[in-house]
């Protein structure tokens, strides 16, 4: 699966799955990084989230492989 990095911390693969990187402040104003996943064609805004880009890619790739 090929991932293309687009502007604004956003990745997309050839199937239209998307990953968006967010910096979120916790209760103590520490920056936490989250990667929000979205399966192509999904009606919900997000299919899941992780704390690393590699894990986000693995989850979407695993989901895509189990669909075939």
Image (cartoon, rainbow, N blue to C red):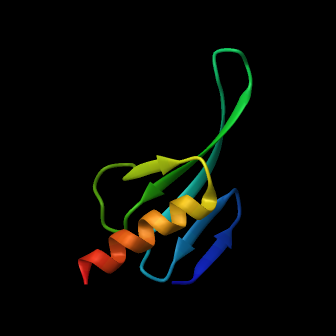
- Can you tell which quarter of the image residue 53 is in? bottom right
x and y percent of residue 52 in the render? 62, 53
Q: Nearer the viewer, residue 56 or 9?
A: 56
- Residue at x 67% of width, y 69% of height: 6
Name of the residue lying farthest toward the top: 28
Q: Is residue 18 above or below residue 25?
A: below
Work out which quarter of the rendered image holds the C terminus and state it: bottom left
- Can you tell which quarter of the image residue 7 is in? bottom right
x and y percent of residue 9 in the render? 68, 57
- Can you tell which quarter of the image residue 66 is in? bottom left
Q: Is residue 18 left or right of residue 8?
A: left
Q: Count up the numbered dots.
A: 0
Q: Is residue 46 left or right of residue 35?
A: left
Q: Nearer the viewer, residue 68 or 15?
A: 68
- Residue at x 51% of width, y 84% of height: 1
Name of the residue lying farthest toward the right: 30
- Residue at x 64% of width, y 23% of height: 26
- Residue at x 54% of width, y 71% of height: 12
Q: Is residue 14 left or right of residue 2?
A: left
Q: Is residue 31 left or right of residue 21?
A: right
């Amino acid at each position: 699966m090929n991932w293309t990095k687009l502007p604004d911390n956003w990745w997309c693969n050839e199937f239209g799955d998307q990953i968006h990187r967010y910096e979120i402040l916790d209760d103590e104003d520490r920056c936490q990084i989250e990667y929000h996943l979205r399966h192509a064609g999904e009606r919900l805004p997000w299919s899941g989230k992780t704390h690393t880009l590699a894990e986000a890619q693995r989850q979407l790739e695993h989901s895509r492989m189990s669909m075939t």
